Every structure is written in structure tokens, then in C-alpha cells.
Amino acid sequence: MVSQTTVVIATRDRADDLARTLTRLRELDVPVIVVDNGSSDDTVARVRREFAGVEVLALRHNEGALARNHGVRRATTPYVAFSDDDSWWAPGSLPRAEELFARHPRLGLVAARTIVEPFGRLDPVCEEMARSALGRDDDLPGPSVLGFVCCGAIVRRSAFLAAGGFHPVLFWPGEERLFSWDLAAAGWACCYVDDVVAHHRPSSFRPPSAWRRRVEMRNELLTTWLRRPVGVVLGQTAALLRQAVGDRDAGAALGAAVRRLPAVLRHRRRLPADVERRVALVG
């Protein structure tokens, strides 16, 4: 049976991790698109040499989360599963998601149970999604969520494109929250489904924790600026400003967000009232 799902992987300078992931995905017999974010190592040449069935899109520059948008547009299947270069899908999970999409027309994204390797522990984010304050609608296969882990997500391609994909202002990381809001604003549901399973073995090649903390705080603020009411925008901005008094990372995050303010103003769009109520509920 021909797979209805394409796996899209965004990667940069992690050729060894990517090769291990592609070896695991090869067992699933699904189309795979690797989008390389301007790697300086031999990622592109190695994939083309060792994985003949994998399509490679080689970007000239690092585009962050937007690399996944290129992969989704290139895919021809109705569904797209995201993997990172250090994550993969459990056998049977992609066909299971395809069944759910076919049975639930409003379903736009499946947030999978993500197992962190090598010890097989559940990602704590999954525990939060399982007890989502949004509850579970009768026409959906699991609790509704407004956020997910991208390396454990499968999307309906048409819904992804209708929502606009990952946003250019954020770059990376934390792009999932804004996308889930935009997906809901476009009329699609995002659900946590426990019997669709992804595995994630975090790479040893990771950015410094201080840098990541700064960009996460920056993107959390930018996400609010892009979609939330003015009162919420002012409140969160003031809170980060107070934090910046004694926290160098918070100050750097605020400064970086301010530098992106012109782009925010061009892209700002308030959420529909019903989506804003749900966003406010989950905090």
C-alpha cells in the first residue's frame, strides 16, 4: 500500500544524527524529504550518496523553522509527518494517523506521544497535552491542544498550507504555539493522540542553553505581539521588562524582540474571539 504520508526533516550540520534517523525511517517505506538549512558539513552529499530514495532540498541559508514549509510545499501526499534529524516514527504510527485524518474531517494536526530515548521516558509535554484544559470534543480522536512538539506532529497538508505554515518572524524555536493558534483560527483542530508514537533521542550537538533560553523568551513575546489583544501584549511586555532588570538573558530577549517589531507590525493579526478564549484558558 502506497503511503499517504511524507516525512519532512529540517536539518543543519548533524549528518551523523540524520543518517541514523534516515536508516530507521527507511524501514517504514514512506517518502522522505530532507530540507538542509545551509549545512557546512557533508549533510547534502551524504544523504544523496547513502539514501538514494530520499529527496533533498538544499537551502543556501539557514531559514530555521521555515525549512519545514519548503518541505510541505514539495510533498505530494495528503499528510506530512515532521521529524527532526534526531527523531523518528514508530512502526504503524503513520498509517494510524492516516486513519484518524480520514475519520475526522476537522482534524488538522495529530500531536503524538513522544518517547525520549535512550531511556524510553515520556516527554513531559505529552503529560500536559493529555490533561489539556480544552477537553475533548466528540468529533475528535483526543484532547484538543494549542501547542505540540514538532518532531512528534503529523499534519493534514491542506490545513498546514491554509494556516500559512510556520511564521517567518519567529525563525526558531517555539514556532509550534503560533502555528497551532493559526491552525485553530483557520478552523482546524489540533489533538493529542496517545497511540500515535514518535521517538526522540536529543542530539549531543545542541545550541548553548543560555542562547536557547533567550530566543525562547524572545519568541514567546513575539508570539503574543503577533496575535493577542493589546492588554495582553502590554502586560507580557511589562513583565519581561521587569525581569530584565536582574536577568541578562531577559534583557537580551526583549532587545531582540524589539528589533523585530517592524515585522511584527506588518504581520500582526488578532485571533478570532473563540480562539482567543481558548488561548487565554490554557495560559
Image (cartoon, rainbow, N blue to C red):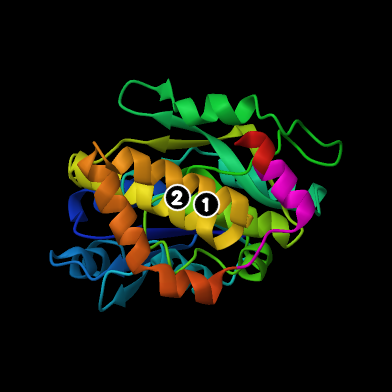
Give the magenta range.
Answer: 269-279
Q: Which residue is mark 1?
A: 234
Q: Position of residue 10 (x, y in %)?
A: 36, 60
Q: Amino acid at mark 1?
A: Leu
Q: Quarter of the image containing the C terminus? A: top right
Quadrant in the rendering for residue 227: bottom right
Name the residue nearer the viewer: 155 or 16.
155
Quadrant in the rendering for residue 271: bottom right
- Badge 2 vs badge 1, beta-carbon distance below 8 Å: yes
Q: Position of residue 273 (x, y in %)?
A: 77, 54
Crowding at label 2, few (<14), some or many (≥20) Cα neighbours within 10 Å? some
Q: Position of residue 231 (x, y in %)?
A: 61, 51
Which mark identifies residue 237? Answer: 2
Drawn side of residue 162 relative to residue 240, left or right: right
User: Is residue 275 within the magenta segment?
Assistant: yes
Name the residue nearer the viewer: 207 or 28.
207
